Image (cartoon, rainbow, N blue to C red):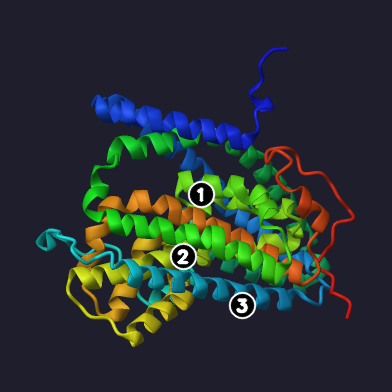
């Protein structure tokens, strides 16, 4: 029989793209092949742009349809509150891991860097970013700029209005349902390109940065990767076992394609469609997943908004010789749990880091010291973000009795790019009997 790429599991295709990308990246770097570096950069950038292109219409139509579909569901508010609660709980655990690891490793002690050359990043975070980041000044601008949190806000408001209007809004709702189906179909054409996109993204990272930049910051880089690994492979499994009574291996089997794509694309928002499909295949009802995943993609960032800023704040304080007390560590935890929403629609971890540094009164120029290795750190941070964004809806659904456990146990045994089978027996968002 003729060879078919579709016969190779999707995760294996991504792994092959990863390996080939690393090889091509090293080839480009060691032989100074600028044309190859440029080609890899173009391939990776085009893939991320295609992903982000589909996100605004996907988020808007999915949330509008989901809000309207919640008509008569008594436990929708309860699900939202439980989701927020578990976002906060897991973020607090993640930032505690970051602080503990920072105190244990002292990543900034003994580091000699040119502090005179450090400059504050152009984009910085502030508490007002939270409010200004939610409400758009121009509805069209939210879509043009791809500000997902603003799109979520608009979609919730319009969906709620359509819900209250009732029958008169049915043509509008039907239009959104049709658009949602069209966007999803086009989106999975893009997802099929993920192995090629992985090749370009990883290849460009290796060709552009290599491992040279890690030398003076090796302890800090290692601490970030170890911290994220602890959250990924210790904290999250414990949460699944203790809070959800779920097998962690089955969770990672189902969520791994999204975690993989998050690692190579370095974009929680760009990975969001794959995260949502993974969560649904883990047995979470679609109506709930369409709320929790887009919201989590903009505000649930255990890597970028908890582990990383905690370690980075300790690193900067030690480099600049600033002593941090117990109150400062509590403040880091507070900023990580509450302030992550301020980064929505902005440039991820850098904005969150500057928000943390400014709240602690540390030099913002300290963030400039870490910009050189940010792409390398961003891979593991984003993978952790995506895993957390899939974890919370799964745990909440399990605790509320709406998780399809049969689907959960079979997660990962189907190719992510296969059509989703129609299953009318799957639990919905109806209230759980007392």
Q: Quadrant of the C terminus?
A: bottom right
In the displayed structure, 151 sits above or below 243; it is above
State whether residue 140 appears in this view.
no
The disc at residue 262 is 1
The residue located at (67%, 76%) in the rendering is: 82
Secondary element at tag 3: helix
> Decide: marks 1, 2 in contact (CB < 8 A)?
no
State whether residue 128 appears in this view.
yes
Earlier in the chain: of badge 1 and badge 3, it is 3
In the displayed structure, 233 sits above or below 156; it is above
Q: Is residue 64 left or right of residue 100?
A: right
Residue at which label 2 appears: 344
The residue located at (33%, 30%) in the rendering is: 26
* Foreground pick, 263 / 178: 263
Q: Is residue 307 left or right of residue 279?
A: left
Q: Position of residue 19 (x, y in %)?
A: 46, 32
Total residue callouts: 3
Mark 3 neighbour class, 10 Å CA radius: few under 14, some 14 to 19, many 20 or more: some
Secondary element at tag 1: helix
Residue at which label 3 appears: 85
CA distance for labels 2 and 3: 19 Å
Q: Position of residue 409 (x, y in %)?
A: 77, 52
CA distance for labels 1 and 2: 17 Å
Q: Residue furthest bottom?
A: 327
- Examine the image and state in which quarter residue 225 appears: bottom left
């Amino acid at each position: 029989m003729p060879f078919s790429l579709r016969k190779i599991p999707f995760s294996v295709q991504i792994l092959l793209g990863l390996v080939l990308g690393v090889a091509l990246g090293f080839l480009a770097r060691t032989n100074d092949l600028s044309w190859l570096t440029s080609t890899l950069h173009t391939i990776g950038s085009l893939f991320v742009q295609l992903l982000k292109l589909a996100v605004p219409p996907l988020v808007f139509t999915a949330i509008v349809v989901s809000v309207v579909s919640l008509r008569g569901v008594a436990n929708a508010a309860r699900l939202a509150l439980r989701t927020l609660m578990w976002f906060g709980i897991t973020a607090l655990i993640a930032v505690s891991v970051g602080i503990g690891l920072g105190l244990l490793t002292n990543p900034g002690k003994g580091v000699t860097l040119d502090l005179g050359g450090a400059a504050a990043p152009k984009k910085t975070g502030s508490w007002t970013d939270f409010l200004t980041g939610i409400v758009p000044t121009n509805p069209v601008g939210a879509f043009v700029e791809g500000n997902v949190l603003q799109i979520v806000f608009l979609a919730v408001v319009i969906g709620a209005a359509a819900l209250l209007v009732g029958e008169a809004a049915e043509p509008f709702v039907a239009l959104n349902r049709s658009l949602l189906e069209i966007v999803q179909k086009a989106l999975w054409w893009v997802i099929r390109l993920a192995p090629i996109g992985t090749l370009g993204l990883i290849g460009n990272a290796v060709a552009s940065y290599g491992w040279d930049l890690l030398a003076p910051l090796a302890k800090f880089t290692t601490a970030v990767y170890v911290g994220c690994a602890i959250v990924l492979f210790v904290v999250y499994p414990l949460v699944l076992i203790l809070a959800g009574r779920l097998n962690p291996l089955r969770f990672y089997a189902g969520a791994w394609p999204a975690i993989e794509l998050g690692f190579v694309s370095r974009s929680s928002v760009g990975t969001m469609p794959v995260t949502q499909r993974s969560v649904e295949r883990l047995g979470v009802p679609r109506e709930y997943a369409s709320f929790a995943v887009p919201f989590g993609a903009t505000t649930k960032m255990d890597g970028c908004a908890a582990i990383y800023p905690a370690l980075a704040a300790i690193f900067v304080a030690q480099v600049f010789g600033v002593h941090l007390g117990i109150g400062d560590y509590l403040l880091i935890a507070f900023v990580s749990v509450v302030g992550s929403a301020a980064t929505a629609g902005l440039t991820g971890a850098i904005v969150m880091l500057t928000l943390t540094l400014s709240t602690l009164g540390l030099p913002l120029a300290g963030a400039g010291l870490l910009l050189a290795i940010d792409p390398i750190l961003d891979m593991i941070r984003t993978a952790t973000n995506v895993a957390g964004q899939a974890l919370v809806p799964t745990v909440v659904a399990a605790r509320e009795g709406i998780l399809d456990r049969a689907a959960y146990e079979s997660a990962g045994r189907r190719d992510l790019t296969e059509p989703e089978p129609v299953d009318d027996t799957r639990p919905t968002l109806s209230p759980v009997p007392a």
